[in-house]
Amino acid sequence: DAGVIQSPRHEVTEMGQEVTLRCKPISGHDYLFWYRQTMMRGLELLIYFNNNVPIDDSGMPEDRFSAKMPNASFSTLKIQPSEPRDSAVYFCASSLRRGPYNEQFFGPGTRLTVL
Amino acid sequence: DQQVKQNSPSLSVQEGRISILNCDYTNSMFDYFLWYKKYPAEGPTFLISISSIKDKNEDGRFTVFLNKSAKHLSLHIVPSQPGDSAVYFCAALTQGGSEKLVFGKGMKLTVNP
């Protein structure tokens, strides 16, 4: 089975441009997570969805960030307008709730560079 | 405000020796702890976990120890292998419905042949 798929793998853009990151979770998983990894802050949870509904977006840094999950097989994370400090690796992960803890499966990440 | 702390950014060990990776946490509500491993250009992958009702969990070469009173956990890898070279993340979870994992900043382990 395919794992979590993210696109693009690399994105280089200029400050002020809109950036859209895409994620396809593992089929059948009911949770989807967006993380950001930076040297300074490590791996941070931005937002997560359950059955396509956003549950906790407290990690979204500011209004320039938005995430959607229009269906069970697709999610986007959008940054508009982008800034150099948004440069990071963005990971998408998915999981299936079967018990008190549910392993999260991560995609390969999108490395974003904002010039 | 880091609730999960990995204070050493890197560790280098010789092949065959023990690797000990440490993690401290501040939130006493955490009751499930996990280690993830990450290779370059890949996403983190789950390695091993431990519930707060235990103080040790073992899986092959990997053992995680939990000291709740000290709010400290550690990952032991014995024997270490060059393929273990990766970044290791400690993470914590509060059970009770939330799926929100809190990660440390990670530690880079290098196992030298």
Image (cartoon, coloured by chain):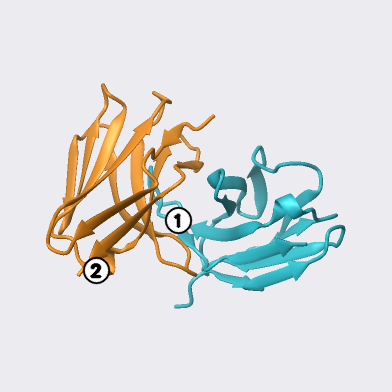
Chain colours: A cyan, B orange
Report the chain holding disc 2: B
Picture quadrant of residue A70: bottom right
Q: Is residue B6 left or right of residue B73?
A: right
Which amino acid lies under the numbered mark 1 shown in the image of this protein? Gln
Residue sitting nearer the eye, B43 or B13: B13
Q: Position of residue A64 (x, y in %)?
A: 81, 48
- Residue A63 vs B66, above or below: the answer is below
Helix, strand, or loop for circle 1?
Answer: loop
Helix, strand, or loop for circle 2?
Answer: helix
The reply to whether residue A75 is in sight is no
Residue A104 is tagged as 1
The reply to whether residue A63 is in sight is yes
Q: Position of residue A56 (x, y in %)?
A: 63, 40
- Residue A41 vs A82, above or below: the answer is above
**From the image, which quarter does the C terminus of chain B lie in?**
bottom left
- Residue A105 vs B6, above or below: the answer is below
Seen at 48% across and 72% down, the residue is A3
Report the chain holding disc 1: A
Tell me the residue that label 2 is attached to: B82
Seen at 27% across and 42% down, the residue is B50
Residue A10 is tagged as none
Q: Position of residue B32 (x, y in %)?
A: 35, 38
Picture quadrant of residue A17: bottom right
Which amino acid lies under the numbered mark 2 shown in the image of this protein? Pro
- Residues at marks 1 and 2, common chain? no
